[in-house]
Amino acid sequence: MSTVTTAGTAGPPAAPKSWAALGPLTARSLKSCLRTPSLLLSPLLTSAFFMIIYEGQLSSVTAAATPG
């Protein structure tokens, strides 16, 4: 039989690395959004459309449930 030996020192936990990468990744995403503002238009219009639809449908429910 053979035995496998591993080093006794473990590396640093993964959490500090992910938090360290948060700043540069956020900056890169913001730069890409500023370069192509048209990519933001479609999601904003879709959200506004559904907000208007939901408000129109649910306003009667809330008016009946909470008078005044």
Image: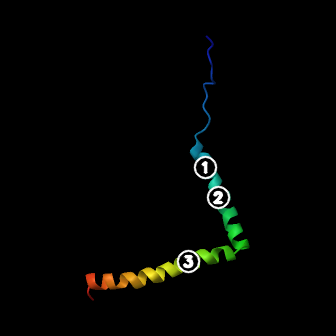
> Between tags 3 and 1, which lies in front?
3
Which circle marks residue 1 in the picture?
none
The residue located at (71%, 67%) in the rendering is 32
| Amino acid tagged 1 | Ser
Instruction: Compare marks 1 and 2 and give the one earlier in the sequence.
Output: 1
User: In the image, residue 51 lies at what x, y percent?
Assistant: 47, 80
Which circle marks residue 18 in the picture?
1
**Looking at the rendering, which quadrant does residue 37 occupy?**
bottom right
Residue sitting nearer the eye, 28 or 43: 43
The residue located at (45%, 82%) in the rendering is 53
Q: Is residue 39 left or right of residue 66?
A: right
Label 3: which secondary element: helix
- Residue 66 appears in the figure: no
Residue sitting nearer the eye, 24 or 49: 49
Please, which residue is most extreme toward the right here? 35
Residue identifier under label 3? 46
Which circle marks residue 23 in the picture?
2
Residue sitting nearer the eye, 4 or 27: 4
| Amino acid tagged 2 | Gly
**Looking at the rendering, which quadrant does residue 65 occupy?**
bottom left
Label 2: which secondary element: helix
User: In the image, residue 61 lies at what x, y percent?
Assistant: 32, 82
Label 1: which secondary element: helix
> Between tags 2 and 3, which lies in front?
3
Name the image colouring.
rainbow
Q: Look at the picture and state if 6 lies above or below 29.
A: above
> For the residue carrying disc 1, how many other residues have a C-alpha within 10 Å: few (<14), some (14-19), or many (20+)?
few
Please, which residue is most extreme toward the bottom here? 68
Location of the C terminus by quadrant is: bottom left
- Residue 19 appears in the figure: yes
